[in-house]
Image: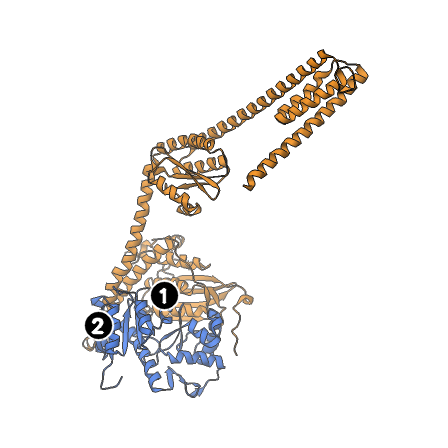
C-alpha cells in the first residue's frame, strides 16, 4: 500500500445492495473496489487481482463461506474480514481459527468495518516492513526491544504478561481468540482454561489501564477473545 | 440347544422329587397303618393307602402317584393280607383284591390329577377374564388417546411380561430405534397396510407385530417381544381380545381426527420455524443494506457538511438498528419458548459484561449521562457472558426508553452476599405497585406509557429468561410512579474458595 497505488479490495457478496453500499463506502475511503458474487469467482479473483483486502460474506450461493475461507487461506495471507449474520460466538471463533482476521456482524456501520479492515491491513504491513512499535492509546509496545511503556514510562511485566500483550499487539485492532492466546501463552493442554486469561487480564489491566473496571486499551469480546484498542481510531468506532 | 436340555433335566429332577415325597407320604401312612394293626387290631385297612395316592395325584402329578400306588400295594400286602408281615400274598382272592386296589389307586390318581389341571385352567381363565375386564374399564375411563395407548401398553406388557413397543399414532419416535432392524422393517410394512399381523424371529426372540386396529393402520402398530415363549397362538388370541376392545374405544374417541390435527400442528410448527429462519435472513439482509448505506451517506463529505442531512442519515441508521433489535427480540423469544437456550458457561469478569453491554448501546445512551460504579475486585462469575450481556442490554434499553433525555442512568456492579449484582437505576417513569407485579411477563407493557413509547413487551421477559438460564434472578424495584426504577441482575458466585485457580505465571 503506497501513496501512488490505491489499495485494492475484493468484496465477495451475492446481495447487490450490500455490494453497492460497500463499494460506495470503500471508494470514499480510497479503495479500488472489485466484486465477486460467488465463492468460485472469489477464489479466482484473489489469484488474478491479488487484492490488498478481502471482505467475505458467509452466505454465498455456491459454497459455504467458511470453505471459501479455508481454501483461500491454504495459499494466501491476504487480510480478510468476514461479514456474518450469525451472531453465534462459536461460529465466530471457528472462522477466526480458520484464518479470518476479524468479523463484523450484519447489520454494521461502515466505520466499524473500516476500522477492522485497516487494522488487519496494518498487521500485514507490519509483518512486511518489520515495523516494531504498536500504539494503543497511551500504551506503546516495542516488539523488537520488548519494552512496554505507558505515557512514556516503562511498565514492568512478567514474561507471560508480556507474551499476552505481544500477541494482542501483533493483531492490534483485531480480535484474538481465547484459544489462540491460551495455546500461545500456556500451551495446547490449557486451550480451554479461559479463567487463566481472566485472571491474567485483570492483573494486566491494573498495570496498563487508567481505570481497570473501564478498560480503554485491553478490550473484551465476550465469548470470543480479546482485542487491543484500535491505535488510530481509538477504542470506540464513531460513525 | 443348551436351554432345552437344561429344561429336560429340570423336569426329571421335579419328577424325582415328587416320587421321593410320594414315598415319604406312603411311609407316613405305613406308620399309621402299623399303629392301627398293633393297637386297634384293624385287619381290613388297605384303603388307607389310597390317601397318599390321592394326595400325590393332586399335588405332585401322575408319576409320583403311580409310585405311591405301587408302594401302597406292596405295603398293603405286607400288613393286611396273609401271610402277614411278608410282601408275599398267598390266596388268589387276595391277589384279585390287591389288583383291584391297584386299579382303583391308578384311576383315583388320574382323576385327582385331571381335576387339579382343570381347576388350574379355570383359575387362569378367570384371571385372564378379570384382567380383560379391568382393561375394558380402564379403556372406558380413558379420556384421551394417549391414555388409551398407555393402557394398551400396560395391559399387554403385564400379559406377556416382556417389552411392548407402540409405533406411529403420534407416539414417541424414539421407540422405533429400540426394536431390531428386521422388526422395524416388518413394522414399516404393516404400517403401510401390508397385513394385519405377523411374527418375526430375531436373535432367538419371537416378535408378534400387529396393527392396533383391524380396520386401519392409522391407530399405530404394536410390536411385542415374546422372547422364547412357545405359546404364540395363545398370546396372539389374547392380544386380539385386548385390541378388539381398545380399537373400538379409539374409534369412539375419533382419535384419527385428533392424530391428524397433531400432525398438522407439527407441520405448523415446522412452518413457523422456517418462517423465523427466513425472517432472520430476509429482513436482516435489507436492514444491513439500509444501515450500511446510511452510515456511508453520513460519512460522505456532501452529507457531512449539511447538518440536517447528517442527522437524517443518523435517523435512518438508528431506526434500522432498532428494527434489527426488535427482530432479534422476536428470535430470542422464540428460542426461549422452544427451550433452545443453552448457556455456554465460562469464568468472566463481571465488569466485562457491563462494559460490553454499554458499548453495544453507546448511541442509545448518548443523550443520557451514564454514571458507572463498579467494584474493582469483584469475584469472577461462572455464566454465559453473552446471554447475561444480552439481558443487561435489555435493561439498559428500558432505562433509556423510560427516562427523560439528559437524566442520569446509574449503573453499578457490586458484591452482595453470595451474589454479584449488576444494577441499572434510572430517574424516569418508575413503576406503580400494579405494574411491578406484572413486570417481566411476556408482552406486558405499562398502560401509562404504551401510547408514548414503542416496544413489544418482550425485553424484560427475555432478560428474565436469560438470567434464569444462568442460575440468576432479576429484580425490579421502584418507589412508585415517576420515582425512577432500579432493575438488578443477581448472579450467584460460589464462595471465594471456589474462584478459578490462578494461572501459572512462569
* Chain letter of disc 1 in the image: A
Can residue B479 be seen? no
Judging from the image, the colouring scheme is by chain
Q: Residue B82: horizontal and vertical position, in percent?
A: 77, 14
Q: Quadrant of the N terminus of chain A?
A: bottom left
Q: Earlier in the sequence, mark 1 or mark 2?
A: 2
Q: Residue A30: horizontal and vertical position, in percent?
A: 23, 80
Instruction: Relative to A68, say whether B101 is above or below.
Output: above
Instruction: Relative to A182, say whether B47 is above or below.
Output: above
Q: Is residue B97 left or right of residue B243?
A: right
Residues marked 1 and 2, same chain: yes
Please give the residue where the numbered disc 2 appears in the rendered image. Answer: A35
Task: Provide the secondary structure element on which disc 1 rests.
Answer: helix
Q: Is residue B92 left or right of residue B274?
A: right
The label number, if any, that marks residue A91 in the structure image: 1
Q: Nearer the viewer, residue A5 or B488?
A: A5
Task: Provide the secondary structure element on which disc 2 rests.
Answer: strand
Query: What is the residue that sits farthest to the right in this orientation?
Result: B39
Gap in angstroms between the C-alphas marked 1 and 2 = 25 Å
Neighbourhood count class around disc 2 (C-alpha, 10 Å): few under 14, some 14–19, many 20 upward = many
Which chain has been coloured orange in this picture?
B
Residue B288 falls in image quadrant: bottom left
Instruction: Relative to A187, say whether B45 is above or below.
Output: above
Q: Residue B311: horizontal and vertical position, in percent?
A: 23, 71
Q: Residue B179: horizontal and vertical position, in percent?
A: 43, 45
Which chain has been coloured blue in this picture?
A
Amino acid at each position: 500500500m503506497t501513496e501512488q497505488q490505491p489499495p485494492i479490495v475484493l468484496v465477495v457478496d451475492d446481495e447487490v445492495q450490500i455490494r453497492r453500499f460497500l463499494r460506495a463506502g470503500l471508494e470514499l475511503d480510497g479503495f479500488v473496489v472489485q466484486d465477486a458474487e460467488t465463492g468460485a469467482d472469489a477464489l479466482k479473483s484473489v489469484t488474478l487481482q491479488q487484492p490488498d483486502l478481502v471482505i467475505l460474506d458467509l452466505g454465498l450461493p455456491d459454497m459455504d463461506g467458511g470453505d471459501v475461507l479455508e481454501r483461500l487461506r491454504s495459499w494466501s495471507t491476504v487480510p480478510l474480514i468476514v461479514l456474518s449474520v450469525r451472531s453465534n460466538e462459536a461460529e465466530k471463533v471457528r472462522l477466526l481459527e480458520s484464518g479470518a482476521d476479524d468479523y463484523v456482524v450484519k447489520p454494521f456501520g461502515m466505520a466499524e468495518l473500516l476500522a477492522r479492515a485497516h487494522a488487519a491491513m496494518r498487521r500485514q504491513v507490519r509483518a512486511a516492513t518489520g515495523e516494531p512499535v504498536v500504539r494503543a492509546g497511551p500504551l506503546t509496545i516495542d516488539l523488537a526491544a520488548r519494552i512496554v511503556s505507558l505515557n512514556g514510562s516503562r511498565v514492568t511485566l512478567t514474561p507471560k504478561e508480556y507474551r499476552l500483550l505481544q500477541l494482542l499487539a501483533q493483531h492490534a485492532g483485531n480480535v484474538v481468540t481465547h484459544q489462540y492466546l491460551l495455546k500461545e501463552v500456556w500451551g495446547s493442554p490449557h486451550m480451554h482454561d479461559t479463567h487463566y486469561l481472566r485472571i491474567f487480564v485483570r492483573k494486566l489491566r491494573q498495570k496498563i489501564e487508567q481505570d481497570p473496571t473501564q478498560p480503554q486499551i485491553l478490550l473484551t469480546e465476550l465469548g470470543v477473545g480479546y482485542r487491543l484498542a484500535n491505535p488510530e481510531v481509538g477504542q470506540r468506532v464513531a460513525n | 440347544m443348551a436351554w432345552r436340555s437344561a429344561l429336560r433335566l429340570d423336569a426329571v429332577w421335579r419328577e424325582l422329587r415328587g416320587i421321593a415325597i410320594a414315598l415319604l407320604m406312603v411311609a407316613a401312612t405305613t406308620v399309621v397303618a402299623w399303629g392301627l394293626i398293633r393297637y386297634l387290631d384293624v385287619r381290613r385297612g388297605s384303603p388307607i393307602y389310597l390317601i397318599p395316592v390321592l394326595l400325590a395325584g393332586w399335588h405332585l402329578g401322575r408319576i409320583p402317584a403311580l409310585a405311591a400306588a405301587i408302594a401302597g400295594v406292596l405295603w398293603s400286602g405286607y400288613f393286611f393280607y396273609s401271610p402277614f408281615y411278608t410282601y408275599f400274598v398267598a390266596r388268589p382272592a387276595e391277589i384279585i383284591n390287591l389288583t383291584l386296589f391297584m386299579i382303583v389307586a391308578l384311576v383315583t390318581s388320574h382323576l385327582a390329577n385331571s381335576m387339579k389341571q382343570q381347576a388350574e385352567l379355570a383359575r387362569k381363565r378367570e384371571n385372564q377374564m378379570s384382567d380383560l375386564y379391568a382393561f375394558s374399564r380402564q379403556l372406558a375411563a380413558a379420556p384421551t388417546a394417549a391414555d388409551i395407548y398407555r393402557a394398551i401398553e400396560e395391559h399387554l406388557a403385564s400379559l406377556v411380561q416382556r417389552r411392548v413397543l407402540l409405533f406411529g399414532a403420534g407416539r414417541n419416535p424414539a421407540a422405533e430405534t429400540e426394536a431390531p432392524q428386521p422388526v422395524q422393517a416388518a413394522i414399516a410394512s404393516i404400517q403401510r397396510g401390508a397385513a394385519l399381523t405377523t411374527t418375526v424371529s430375531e436373535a432367538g426372540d419371537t416378535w408378534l407385530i400387529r396393527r392396533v386396529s383391524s380396520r386401519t393402520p392409522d391407530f399405530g402398530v404394536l410390536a411385542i417381544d415374546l422372547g422364547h415363549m412357545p405359546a404364540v397362538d395363545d398370546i396372539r388370541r389374547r392380544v386380539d381380545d385386548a385390541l378388539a376392545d381398545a380399537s373400538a374405544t379409539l374409534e369412539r374417541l375419533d382419535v384419527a381426527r385428533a392424530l391428524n390435527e397433531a400432525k398438522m400442528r407439527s407441520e405448523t410448527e415446522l412452518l413457523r420455524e422456517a418462517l423465523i429462519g427466513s425472517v432472520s435472513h430476509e429482513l436482516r439482509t435489507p436492514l444491513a443494506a439500509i444501515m450500511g448505506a446510511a452510515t456511508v451517506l453520513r460519512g460522505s463529505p456532501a452529507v457531512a457538511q449539511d447538518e440536517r442531512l447528517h442527522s437524517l442519515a443518523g435517523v435512518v441508521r438508528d431506526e434500522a438498528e432498532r428494527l434489527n433489535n426488535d427482530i432479534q427480540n422476536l428470535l430470542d423469544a422464540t428460542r426461549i419458548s422452544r427451550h433452545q437456550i443453552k448457556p455456554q458457561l465460562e469464568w468472566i469478569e463481571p465488569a466485562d459484561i457491563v462494559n460490553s453491554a454499554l458499548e453495544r448501546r453507546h448511541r442509545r445512551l448518548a443523550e443520557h449521562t451514564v454514571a458507572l460504579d463498579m467494584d474493582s475486585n469483584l469475584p469472577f462469575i461462572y455464566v454465559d457472558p453473552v446471554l447475561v450481556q444480552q439481558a443487561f442490554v435489555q435493561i439498559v434499553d428500558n432505562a433509556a426508553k423510560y427516562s427523560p433525555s439528559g437524566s442520569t442512568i446509574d449503573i453499578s456492579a457490586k458484591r452482595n452476599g453470595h451474589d454479584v449484582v449488576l444494577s441499572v437505576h434510572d430517574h424516569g417513569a418508575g413503576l406503580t405497585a400494579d405494574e411491578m407485579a406484572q413486570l417481566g411477563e411476556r408482552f406486558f407493557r405499562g398502560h401509562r406509557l404504551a401510547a408514548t413509547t414503542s416496544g413489544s413487551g418482550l425485553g424484560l421477559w427475555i432478560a428474565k429468561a436469560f438470567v434464569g438460564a444462568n442460575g440468576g434472578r432479576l429484580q425490579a424495584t421502584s418507589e412508585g410512579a415517576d420515582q425512577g426504577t432500579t432493575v438488578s441482575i443477581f448472579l450467584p458466585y460460589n464462595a471465594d474458595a471456589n474462584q478459578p485457580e490462578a494461572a501459572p505465571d512462569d
